[in-house]
Image (tube, helix red, strand yellow):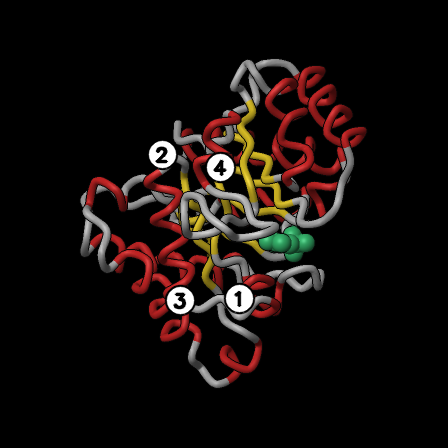
Amino acid sequence: MKQPLIVANWKMNGSELLLRDLVRAFEHQGPDLAAQVVLTLPAPFFSLARALLESGEISWGGQNIHWQDEGAFTGEISAPMIAAMGGTHCIVGHSERRQGWAETDQVVASKAQACLRADITPIVCVGERLEERQQDKTMEVVKRQLEAVITNLAPALLEKIVVAYEPVWAIGTGQEATPEMAQEVHSSLKKLLGTQCLQSPPVLYGGSVKADNVAALLAMDDVDGVLVGGASLVTEEFVRLCAYAGEQAKNNSNG
Ligand code: PEP
């Protein structure tokens, strides 16, 4: 059975209390969670994550890094810093960074490379804005964003990334893409990835994912997991979402 990957993106939210609460809730849930869970956290919570998630059943990581490994970049953190603390993943190219910090495709590609140099997994976000979808430019946009990252990656490195398709109009709006819309884009992204490596990296869907819609998304052939913002900040909702994701994975492998 292929375990779905569930990535929580807390953005600039949460607290140590929430992290403790979430970890405790997963412990109560028991060991048969058939999903792989990664919490991407604000940097001030990294130490606590290292202490609480030491067993490695749940992984953790960052939401952004600088593309350099070290230097005079006040306020930034680097991929080697996350790796040194035991973090395993980092989001790069989230639409909030592309829009709010003017991150270009090239910057996102450099950040993905920084993650790979530090041996952590970049979760590379791509996604179209509403007007781009309305102008029928979805595929053009997401392929351009992904190509910028994968063009110069050797197949062995490409297989180490995770891709997240996040339509910008679906993030934090409660208006998720339908499973069929997600499948259509994922299938194109996987074809593109497949031109450069044998084993396509996982492609996650993100945008208003909740416990109630996760199973339908994961029932799609090319949806390998989900990236979850708002619903990862409510312990009961997130634990339920992960449990439903695990159940769907079992259904997929039985069917
Ligand atoms: C996100 O921030 O990546 C995200 C998908 O947010 P939400 O689930 O709240 O739409």
Q: Nearer the viewer, residue 187 or 116?
A: 116
- Secondary structure beneath disc 2? loop
Quadrant for ligand 1 reads bottom right
Q: Residue at x 42, y 79 (%)?
A: 137
Residue marked by disc 3: 105
Residue marked by disc 2: 119
- Secondary structure beneath disc 1? helix
Distance of label 3 from label 1 (alpha carbons): 8 Å
Distance of label 4 from label 2 (alpha carbons): 18 Å
Q: Is residue 195 above or below residue 55?
A: below
Tell which circle, 2 or 1, labels the residue nearer the N-terminal end: 1
Tell which circle, 4 or 3, labels the residue nearer the N-terminal end: 4
CB of mark 4 within 8 Å of CB of mark 1? no
Instruction: Pinpoint residue 166: horizontal percent, then vertical percent.
Output: 52, 59
Q: Is residue 177 visible?
A: no
Q: Nearer the viewer, residue 30 or 61?
A: 61
